[in-house]
Image (cartoon, rainbow, N blue to C red):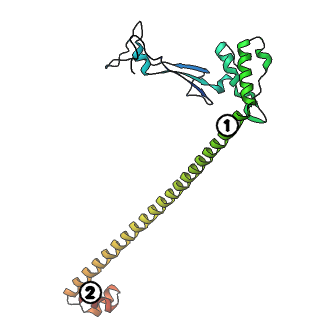
Amino acid sequence: MRKETKGKYALPTVAVYLLGHCVGKFTEPVIYAKHKVYDYEGNEILQETPDPFVESLQHDSIIVQIPLLRGRVNNRLEKILSVFDQSQIYPDDQRMLELDENKYADDAEMEHILHRLQSAAANPDIRNRMNAEDEFFQALEDRDTAIIQKDATIMTQKKELEKQKTELDEKDAALQEKDAALEEQKASLRAAVLTLSKTGMTAEMIAKTLNIGEEKIQEILS
């Protein structure tokens, strides 16, 4: 922040968010979010007069949860915001609100606001821009939907591939166990044949003893 002239600073910014959804578990339609100043140890620094330079570095926020405005008018601010009450959406056009002007007949400021909104709604250029925005956001929504569906398909395919890999790994493990068992059987058979051969038994006698073909015995002894 640059100090323009002695003793003068830029005005702090207050951001106003008009949300078409609710935030967390807040039940109030209007929320004020203000920042605080802390030292290195995390202790809040309190000053009788806030420093204008520090105040200009961050902005406070006003969050309006439009869904919570439904029929609620308890103060001046809520009365003004009631013109955004989404429970009054016009059936034939979701972008328009069907407001009862009689509710604001005794309030010149509200009548002025309604007149400005009605003028904007009747303006062809503004309606064209609204249509263009609708088309733009619809295109974005279609794109996001396509991306989500594509991601879901990819995730499904990935899970299927992982499942197939797991099944192949299990089959490979089973084959390895089978191969190991066969090798163990071969080793046991070889040891038995060699042991019997050392006792002076012929290949024919060993074959009959172990109930194995003589050719197999000859193969082991060769």
Residue 205 drawn above or below residue 2:
below
Tell me the quadrant of the picture where the N terminus can be found.
top left
Q: From the viewer's perspective, is 134 left or right of 158?
A: right
Tell me the SS state at disc 2. helix
Query: The disc labelled 1 sits on which kind of residue?
Result: Arg
The quadrant where residue 29 appears? top right
Residue 20 drawn above or below residue 145:
above
Residue lying at 42% horizontally and 11% vertically, measured from the top left: 50
Task: Please rate how many residues cluster around mark 2, counting C-alpha atoms within 10 Å: few if below 14, some from 14 to 19, many from 20.
Answer: some
Counting residues from the start of the chain, the first of labels 1 and 2 encountered is 1
* Mark 1, residue position: 129
* Mark 2, residue position: 220
Q: From the viewer's perspective, is 150 left or right of 185?
A: right
Residue 210 drawn above or below residue 55:
below
Query: The disc labelled 2 sits on which kind of residue?
Result: Ile
Q: What percent of the width, then of the height, locates residue 180?
A: 33, 72
Q: CA distance from mark 1 to mark 2?
A: 91 Å
Q: What percent of the width, then of the height, locates residue 42?
A: 35, 19
Which of the two residues, 83 or 69, is positioned nearer the viewer here? 83
Q: From the viewer's perspective, is 65 left or right of 105?
A: left
* Dots 1, 2 in contact, CB < 8 A: no
Which of the two residues, 37 or 221, is positioned nearer the viewer here? 37
- Foreground mark, 1 or 2? 1
Which of the two residues, 148 or 128, is positioned nearer the viewer here? 128
